[in-house]
Amino acid sequence: MEKKQCKVKVVIRVRPPLVSTEKISVSTKDNHVQIFNHRNINENLQYEFSAVYGSESTQQQIFNDCVKPLLPKALSGQNVSIFAYGPTGAGKTHTMLGTPLNPGVIPRVINELFAEIDRLENSEDNEWEYSVSFSYLEIYQEKVQDLLEPSGSDLPIREDAEKNILVPGLAKKQIHNFDEFKNIFGPASNNRTVAATKLNEHSSRSHSIVQLTVVKKKPCRILHGKIYLIDLAGSEDNRRTGNQGIRLKESGAINKSLFSLGEVVDAINNGLPRIPYRNSKLTRLLQDSIGGTCHSVMITNLAPEERYYYDTYCTLNFATKSKKVVNSTVVRETVGIVKPVPQVRKPSPERKEEGPSQAKLARLDSSTDSMGSDIGSSISPLIKRQEAWEETVNRRLQQMESNLITQMQAFKPPTASGSCAQTPKTKAINELRRQLEENQAQFRELASRHLISPPPNASNKPFADMTNTKPSSTGPQSNLGETTQTEQTSKPGETTKPAAGTKRKRKMTEEFSCSPLFALPPRLKKKGFVSSASASSLHDVKENVTDKKGSHSKEDDLVNSASQLQRNEEFLSTLNTSSVKDLQSLQTVGAKRAKLIFEWRETYGAFTQASDLLKIPGFTEKYLQKLLHSNLVTV
Ligand SMILES: Nc1ncnc2c1ncn2[C@@H]1O[C@H](COP(=O)(O)OP(=O)(O)OP(=O)(O)O)[C@@H](O)[C@H]1O
């Protein structure tokens, strides 16, 4: 299948103010949206998108510009996804559904689809036959529910061997014209969970997905296109919604799934090897729309009132990162003898592990097969990104490992044998060993998964073996080889006479691990951080020890490496897990910055590295350096 790269198109629609007397905080011009900067009231924040529709925009205009051009794609075997995103009360349902007098995207798509099919079927040279069917579901409190045939049960989500997402058991209705659709869709929409909140009298309490399947057939050829029409539930700031009880619970589920959506977008944009689609039902079902095979359009709805300022700000930031997502579109075509039931390909050995069994897949009835999407065909760019990432990791790990080995080998253990109790420095060395072992395990996994050749040091041997080697002028690899040989010659359970030098090696390790010189690396104050002052006093203690026992700079290097790694990890963990109050335990982070870090994290997900802090508006490179420096963190 030929794939074409295609960015998710992100457009903005600002709804009209609901009460004319309210203060407005959003303005639009051409394809720009502008809001004030809450950190500097004299400044404005400007965002650019593919298209920006002000409050005067019409349903017809949105449909004609953003949706209609994609329908021919669905009619030629491609997937299309239109989804409305935005805070509660910003106009998502209005955009997607509209009213009988002012219909939105969903009814207009059906209308246009049948009009287009009529045109095509009536053209002189037409040789194709078209059929349209649809499914309708909602995700309510993390449960997938059928809106066409509600049963109250939570439908499972499966993935087949070709990475199509399936919802077995979901009803699928064949429709032949707009009226048939209307007669089924109208009552089904009443099944959707809607309730009044302080911010919206008819607030959607669930995400809803209409899926249209368009099949185009002629002898020996069949094209399958899909159209997903998605009305997401809005993010809710419960300090303002006044939600309590069930509304609060619904809101929690909505916010959590939208948070997962943010994580997926971040993972795609950062080229991560694993995209966390499985973190929520929403992201699982949107797998084809974001980072998948769809031509996707995200209609971002904004409420213009100043009381929505923070929602608007967060939504604009999410929209900005969403426009970077690239999908790989494909034409899904079956050529040859077309069987009435979709064929299921044998899963590859890799897929067998996590996908449903062949027998299970075969049992899936075509009439209940829904949410199909050929994720497999979109996997190539992800694999490419993964491979690039793995190469980088591979390189970094190799470098780190050889540095550590060099340090270990250059280290001269103390001659005076100390007590054999585990000292803090021994612990630090053990931590280094553990980390190196982990690195080696990663190498092996990468190598076995993607045939990346493991670095020379990434053997199956644990790091402990390397420390058993004596310092040698032939460098780390020759030592490694020596140890491997020793290992290979001794059979399990067999007591072998140590080869020349082995005894010495073991002794060195014992001395090494029993060294009394190993002091605990400086810990950071609360959740790991200390002020620069207390860090230096710890350092003084360590220096005193060193002074007494003589200089051990290599040893110190090792301890510093371990403590540095630990500090970096703790710093990241503080950023990702602390409350606003606890974030202030970081040096240079006051209440205001703590709040910004917290809010950014809650909106966009965990920080993967310290430099992610630069994504927070107002965090400059200079400040980041200061923050890292004063918290003794390196990047
Ligand atoms: N473009 C528009 N023109 C006129 N009225 C609008 C427009 N957009 C939204 N509205 C009105 O604003 C109110 C809120 O809109 P809507 O229910 O579509 O919001 P929503 O984003 O779907 O909210 P929720 O996430 O809570 O379901 C409704 O009364 C709707 O009719």
Image (cartoon, helix red, strand yellow):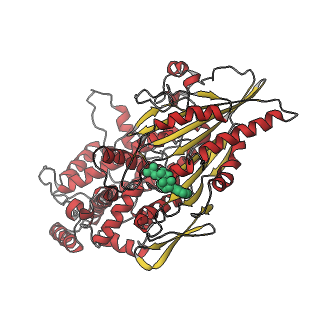
Q: Residue at x 24, y 62 (%)?
A: 582
Left or right of 509 on screen, residue 404: right
Residue extending farthest front: 101
Q: Position of residue 222 (x, y in %)?
A: 72, 28
- Picture quarter with the C terminus: bottom left
Left or right of 10 on screen, residue 571: left
Q: How many marks?
A: 0
Q: Position of residue 501 (x, y in %)?
A: 30, 45
Does residue 72 lie above or below 586 as drawn? above
Q: Position of residue 244 (x, y in %)?
A: 28, 49
Left or right of 508 on screen, residue 345: right
Q: Residue at x 33, y 49 (%)?
A: 435
Q: Position of residue 402 (x, y in %)?
A: 41, 54
Of the pair 516 and 415, the residue shown nearer to us: 516
**In the picture, residue 178 is in which quadrant?**
top right
Residue extending farthest bottom: 42
Does residue 619 lie above or below 324 as drawn? below
Tell me, yes or no, if residue 337 can be seen here. Answer: yes
Left or right of 124 on screen, residue 21: left
Q: Residue at x 33, y 71 (%)?
A: 627
Of the pair 440 and 123, the residue shown nearer to us: 123
Of the pair 472 and 83, the residue shown nearer to us: 83
Tell me, yes or no, if residue 270 can be seen here. Answer: no
**In the picture, residue 135 is in which quadrant?**
top right
